[in-house]
Image (cartoon, rainbow, N blue to C red):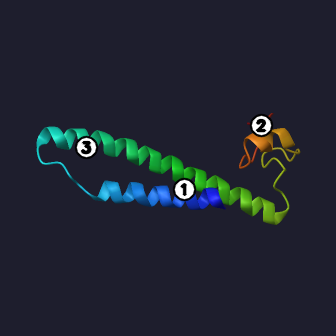
Amino acid sequence: MARLKELDMRLHAIEDQLDDPKAKDWEEAATEREGDEVLEKLGKHGEAEIRRIRAALQRLRAGTYATCTSCGDTISEDRLDVLPDTPFCKACA
């Protein structure tokens, strides 16, 4: 849950930066646009991580957390320790 809160705060900060144009001339605008592209990619990665975490929490509530959503085999504890939001066993990843 702490990770979700951290990601939510980070995404809001990215949105605020993207909504606040600062460039005065063409050169600054080009540089700012490059920065915006980086921020947009970070935002998309953060949103994807939030979706994966929420899906993992849903599987936890449903009692299927350590079960591969592809083949139905058990996901190893070692794999879940490294990738706690993974829906796949090593063979299906």
Type of residue at label 3? Glu
Task: Work out whether residue 10 or residue 55 is closer to the camera in this orientation and state it.
Answer: 10
Q: Can you give x and y, in whole percent of width and height, for residue 80 in the image? A: 79, 44
- Tell me the distance, in whole angstroms, between the alpha carbons under discs 3 and 1: 23 Å
Judged from the image, the secondary structure of the residue bearing numbered disc 3 is helix
Q: Can you give x and y, in whole percent of width and height, for residue 61 in the image? A: 80, 66
Type of residue at label 2? Cys
Judged from the image, the secondary structure of the residue bearing numbered disc 1 is helix
- Tell me the distance, in whole angstroms, between the alpha carbons under discs 2 and 3: 41 Å
92 relative position to 20: left or right: right
Q: Which residue is mark 2?
A: 92
Q: Quadrant of the N terminus?
A: bottom right
Type of residue at label 1? Leu
Q: Can you give x and y, in whole percent of width and height, for residue 70 in the image? A: 78, 45
Q: Which residue is mark 3?
A: 32
Q: Which residue is mark 1?
A: 7
